[in-house]
Image (cartoon, helix red, strand yellow):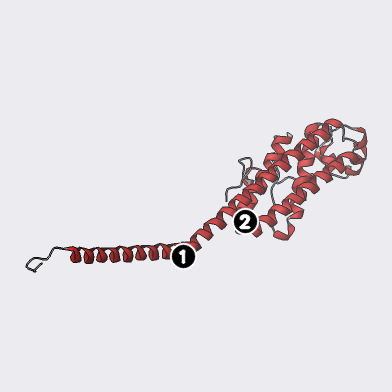
Amino acid sequence: MDITIGGLSSQQSGASSRSAQSYLPGQSDSEKTGNNGASAFAAATSVSLSSESAVRLSADNIVAAINESLQSTGLSIQGVDPNDFTPEAVADRILARVGDLIASNASSEAEAREIFDQASEGIQAGLEDAREILDGLGALNDEINDNISETEERLNEGLQSIEQRLTELFNSSASEEAAEAAAPERDEQVLQSQVTQTAQASQAYAEAGSNAQRNAPRYGTNG
């Protein structure tokens, strides 16, 4: 099932899981994740996150929310490439993971729709969570909000493309199945038509022969 968006597969990046503190600048990993986490988080209101850090946080929250939404299916997606966190790159990679997940695990339209719907719900929940976290950090300025909005717009456009592709795939499959089911009936109709045409031709030939015989001149008879 060819529905990958962005030309990427889920094996091209590793999982990513970070806390809100880990996005704060100027701190070591131990300070971000250790016993000083609470004070680091408290200090968040006095720092400004870079746009890249904000998009990274958004991406991680989206991936986490998608996986939470997919729990009932037993499936999950991996994180995005940590080296490129533009809105376009993040959206492409997340959509590629969703498309790959459907292509690898859905054997029917119902399964494909279930994965798609849950991934879509996760994406929206992740975006909302990211905005709430950034707002709580006091870092949701106009630039960062615009970047998140651009990521959201690209994700929604990509989801529409995936949904359209699913519709095309399964409508095409249904049409092919209907054509295959109708094939024997069409073959029988063609055969019946051929038999009828042959019978009609034979009858016409016989009638033509009879007429020719009746109209033939008869010699040796008195006028």
Going from N to C along the chain, the mark reached first, 2 or 1, is 2
Residue 4: x %, y % from top left: 61, 45
* Count of number-bearing discs: 2
Among the 4 quarters of the image, the one containing residue 25: top right
Real-space Cα distance between discs 2 and 1?
A: 35 Å
**Depth order, front residue of 15/51:** 51
Residue 105's label in the rendered image is 2
Q: Kindly state the secondary structure of the residue where label 1 is placed.
A: helix
Q: Is residue 88 left or right of residue 49?
A: left
Residue occupying the point 74% across, 52% down? 67
Residue lying at the far bottom in this picture: please name it: 221
Picture coordinates of residue 79 (x, y %)? 71, 45
Task: Return the residue nearer the eye: 102 or 162.
Answer: 162
Q: Measuring 73% from the left and 45% from the top, which residue is drawn there? A: 16
Q: Secondary structure at mark 2?
A: helix
Is 61 left, or right, of 214 in this rendering?
right
On the image, numbered disc 1 is attached to which residue?
Answer: 185
State the residue at coordinates (77%, 45%): 62
Q: Look at label 1 and name its amino acid.
A: Glu
How crowded pointer 1 is (Cα within 10 Å; few <14, some 14-19, many 20+) is rated as: few
* Residue nearest the observer in this picture, 122 or 176: 176
Q: Is residue 75 visible?
A: no
Q: Residues within 10 Å of mark 2 (few under 14, many from 20)?
A: some
**Amino acid residing under circle 2:** Asn
Please name whichever residue, 213 or 34, is drawn nearer the observer in this view of the structure: 213
